[in-house]
Amino acid sequence: MKFFLEKVPALKRPIYAFLTVLYSFCLIALMVLFFYFINRIDWWGPLLSQGLMCIIVSLIGLLHFVFASIFRKKYQNLAYQPFFYIFMLPYLITWYACFFHPAFIIGDKLLPIWAQVLLVVFCLLVMILTNIQIEKAGFSVVTHGMDVFTVFPEETTIVRGKIYSFIRHPLQFSLLMGGFAMGFISNTWIGLVISTFQLVPSLIIGFREDWELIVRSGEDHKAYIKQTALLFPIRKLPGFLKLLFLGK
């Protein structure tokens, strides 16, 4: 957190920290209104709103890679601060809007309560265990997860060990599992369907991150891509599950 505050020094001042929280709540309010008005159009409203939001997330995600170097050249050591407010907060809030949206869909229930509870608990457990292994591998949510190193790539090393030896983008996998849990919380066919829509930004951003890492490390990352799955470690599933549930 100390390192993050060095990159966004405005947050050290209470008034700017308050304004940042207010800005975040305004963005969240816009997401709520967006879903509310589109979802009420007809039964297909949630499909449309989730699809549009996933497109928005993907566009912001792609643009923030493009503008990272531009901000670096313009603002130098303070480049991450405007980058954080212009790209990262909208990016995170729109993605988490897609994440939580399925849980608020109401309708006829599909699964019996016991099956619903088991699936919700399983998906959330996998999400939590994945996040634990991400941190153990050296990926920090506060720095890597907030894309500080997209602006300052020379200040970190590429993380590839442990869980990263099974899948290249475990953070997106974690969000997908949590999103599926939200779909099972809804327990409606629309909720379950739209929970899968997070695959769109996950795949787009995952492939874009791979391209970025190929630029940084060349043949090493190309070889790494051939050895590991993007999101789902089908070929290495037993070892992946062993790492998650047994920690080894």
Image (spheres, rainbow, N blue to C red):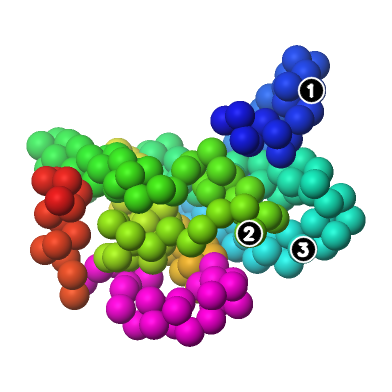
Q: Which residue is mark 3?
A: 69
Task: Give x and y (percent) for residue 218.
Answer: 53, 81
Quarter placement of the N terminus: top right
Q: CA distance from mark 1 to mark 2?
A: 26 Å
Task: Give x and y (percent) for residue 74.
Answer: 89, 56
Task: Give x and y (percent) for residue 220.
Answer: 45, 79
Task: Give x and y (percent) for residue 168.
Answer: 38, 66
Q: Nearer the viewer, mark 3 or mark 1?
A: 3
Q: Can residue 210 be found in the magenta stretch?
A: yes
- Disc 2 crowd, CA 10 A, few/some/many (<14, 14-19, 20+): few
Q: Which residue is mark 1?
A: 16
Mark 3: which amino acid? Ser
Lateral position of residue 134 relative to residue 60, left or right: left
- Disc 1 crowd, CA 10 A, few/some/many (<14, 14-19, 20+): few
Lateral position of residue 149 relative to residue 117, left or right: right
* Viewer-side residue, 233 vs 187: 233
Residue shown at 25%/43% (left/top)?
Answer: 129
Mark 1 and mark 2 lie on one chain; the one further toward the N terminus is 1
Q: Which residues are magenta?
A: 208-234
Mark 3 and mark 1 lie on one chain; the one further toward the N terminus is 1
Mark 2: which amino acid? Pro
Q: Which residue is mark 2?
A: 153
* Viewer-side residue, 1 vs 66: 1
Q: CA distance from mark 3 to mark 1?
A: 25 Å
- Residue 112 location, quadrant: top left
* Viewer-side residue, 103 vs 200: 200
Q: Can residue 95 be found in the magenta stretch?
A: no
